[in-house]
Image (cartoon, grey):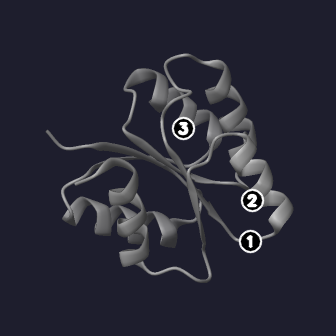
């Protein structure tokens, strides 16, 4: 049974890159282009992992994580943050809200994403 990942990201290049890499590795990927859509997807089919951008339309990553923390079905889903910024204040906030790991968009390569996903949920 393929592990389910919800990718909540509004940059098309990132969506295409991550979706292609993770699908090739056997994961089942659902994509949401904003936080509201992402939460809706999570409620419909609880994923094994969430890849979450911080700055998005409608509901940002921190707001999504706040909602997840209050929901008993969602609060234990591992979250990996994908951010343009590696500011310590942002990373501290993400950790407080339960993020397991993070990637900085300008620094990562697809293999690094895969390594972090495998570390959280396995193959």
User: Which quadrant of the figure has residue 104?
Assistant: bottom right
| Pointer 2 or 1: first along the chain | 1
Q: What residue is at 49 percent from the left and 42 percent from the top?
A: 78
Which residue position is annotated with label 2? 91
Q: Could you say where residue 116 lies in the image, as x and y percent from the top left?
A: 42, 63
Binning the other alpha carbons within 10 Å of mark 1 as few (below 14), some (14 to 19) or many (20 upward) gives some
Q: Quadrant of the N terminus?
A: top left
Q: Which of 33 and 53 is in front in this view?
A: 53
Q: Which mark is residue 86?
A: 1
Q: Which residue lies furthest to the right in this view?
A: 89
| Pointer 3 or 1: first along the chain | 3
Q: Find numbered disc 2 in the image and state the secondary structure of the residue it sits on.
A: helix
Image side of residue 90 versus residue 51, left or right: right
Q: Which of 106 and 20 is in front in this view?
A: 106
Q: Could you say where residue 43 lies in the image, as x and y percent from the top left?
A: 47, 22
- Distance from Cα at disc 2 to Cα at disc 1: 7 Å
The image shows residue 92, relative to residue 113, as above or below, that is above
User: Which quadrant of the figure has residue 97?
Assistant: top right
Residues at marks 2 and 1 touching, judged by CB atoms closer than 8 Å: yes
Binning the other alpha carbons within 10 Å of mark 3 as few (below 14), some (14 to 19) or many (20 upward) gives many
- Distance from Cα at disc 2 to Cα at disc 3: 21 Å
Q: What residue is at 79 percent from the left and 49 percent from the top?
A: 93
Which residue position is annotated with label 3? 38
The answer to whether any part of residue 57 appears in the image is no
Image side of residue 54 versus residue 52, left or right: right
Q: Find numbered disc 1 in the image and state the secondary structure of the residue it sits on.
A: loop
| Pointer 2 or 3: first along the chain | 3
Q: Could you say where residue 73 lies in the image, as x and y percent from the top left?
A: 49, 19
Q: What residue is at 55 percent from the left and 16 percent from the top?
A: 72
Q: What residue is at 26 percent from the left and 43 percent from the top?
A: 3
- Distance from Cα at disc 3 to Cα at disc 1: 23 Å
């Amino acid at each position: 049974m393929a592990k389910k990942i919800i990718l909540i990201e509004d940059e098309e290049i990132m969506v295409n890159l991550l979706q292609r890499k993770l699908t090739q590795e056997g994961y089942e990927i659902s994509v949401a282009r904003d936080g509201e859509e992402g939460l809706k997807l999570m409620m419909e089919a609880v994923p094994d992992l969430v890849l979450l951008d911080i700055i998005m339309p409608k509901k940002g990553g921190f707001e999504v994580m706040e909602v997840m923390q209050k929901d008993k079905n969602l609060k234990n889903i591992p979250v990996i943050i994908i951010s343009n910024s590696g500011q310590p204040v942002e990373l501290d906030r993400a950790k407080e809200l339960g993020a397991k790991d993070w990637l900085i968009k300008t620094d990562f390569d697809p293999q690094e994403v895969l390594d972090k996903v495998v570390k959280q949920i396995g193959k």
